[in-house]
Amino acid sequence: MTDGSRSPEQVGRALQGTLLRIFQSVPDCTMRPTDISRKLVVSRVTVSRTISAIGKENPVEILTGIPGPESLRSIIQAAQKNGVENGDVKVALVAVECFEALIRDQFGTRAALNAALSVKHSGSRDQFEQSSRYKVFKGMSQIIGAESKLWLTCTMYTPNKDDPSTFDLSSIFGPSGLRRIRPDTPIELTFSAGPQRWSVEGEPSGMTFDLESFCANTLAPITVAQKDGKVIKTFAPDIGNKDSIYDMLTGVHIPNAMSRIARPSLTRRGISVIPVIPVALLNMDIILHRSIFEGIEPEAFVYNNRGSGKADFENPDWNINRMATDDKIMQINPGLNNLDLQEVPRYRDMVLRMCDVNGYEPAGFRAYRLQIQYPVYGFQYVMAFRVPSR
């Protein structure tokens, strides 16, 4: 049948069998992509993708990984010119026609087919979602006029030594490897004051600590202003060249930041990040003193805020904005010995600086990490613990 009535699984199997037969029938040639591409005088990349796809067991993976119908036709027609039998060629072309009809009649576009089928197989879904997030990252970088290799958020919770019912909070946050790529779009980073006040210099009222000696790049030149209770940091250096990259990392220590006991409207503690510039990697670390949240594991949440502001993950009404995610939280043991971060070579030294600020030894902590490649610009990413009620 060539009317598109075949299921995706049937089409995937048909492509697998007929294309495998085509490749095996090419005279004086192995199944290596380089050999086939030279023999048929077609793109090695296209041949390699095709062989990789038809080698999958799952027909969904075959369809989401295989090149488009025109590319497949070019391979089959080249094979015919190099001695593959007409009967095998005809059967293979029928399978490609079914593939084309499936795209056209059931899904409309190849992108829609990949999106629909990706949910049927975790490997296809991960590959499709990461590819899609990368496209968003590149597109928004060009629109916003800036991009960063990393957005780093690290929060350390320690018991307050004067009031054990509360804990102190220390944080490192901001972009690293920040680059401006358009001269007509200054970048404004807006920070909410949250529970603490901000000074006119744009820093929280808690004690700040210097991170410049630990940064891999030059500190970003910024101007700071306050408006409507918010702090606006403007980043607008000259474009320079590809090596004109900066860090904008801030270290803050806030004593008696929060109660260690849950309240009716505050049952979770953690970190929440909305990337305000396109970033290639979001790294979220929570570092806990061993006496805090014992036996409790963190949860990950992702929200599509849809322009509605910051999601309140305590409010069940926000569940409609939650996105499904397979991103896993990793526990890092032992202590803080394995907290290395390739993008920030002296990251562990930054964390040890937080230990000094808090007055606790590194051996007394456990750490959790959530990493997202190409987080979607404007989405909200959360890692939080459910707080004990007593």
Image (cartoon, rainbow, N blue to C red):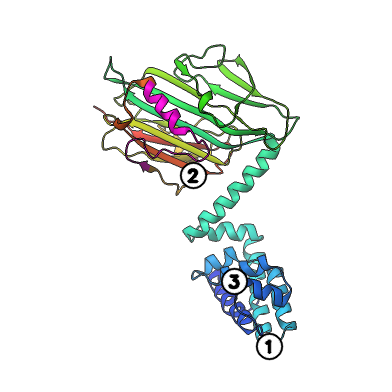
Q: Residue at x 56, y 68 (%)?
A: 62
Where is mark 3, residue-wise? Answer: 51
Dot placed on the residue nearer the N-terminal end, 3 or 2: 3
Where is mark 2, residue-wise? Answer: 323
| Vertical order, 320 against 209 (above or below) | below
Residue 288 position in % (x across, y down): 34, 31
The tag on residue 85 is: 1
The residue nearer to you, when weighing 166 against 309, is: 166
The tag on residue 75 is: none
Q: Quadrant of residue 332?
A: top left
Dot placed on the residue nearer the N-terminal end, 3 or 1: 3
The residue nearer to you, when weighing 135 against 6, is: 135
C-alpha separation, residue under disc 1 versus residue under disc 2: 50 Å
Q: Residue at x 64, y 33 (%)?
A: 245
Foreground disc of the pair 3, 1: 3
Viewport quadrant of the N terminus: bottom right
Based on the picture, tell me whether residue 346 belongs to the magenta stretch: yes
Secondary structure, mark 1, is: loop
Specify the segment rendered in magenta.
Answer: 331-356
Based on the picture, tell me whether residue 295 belongs to the magenta stretch: no
Residue 225 position in % (x across, y down): 62, 15
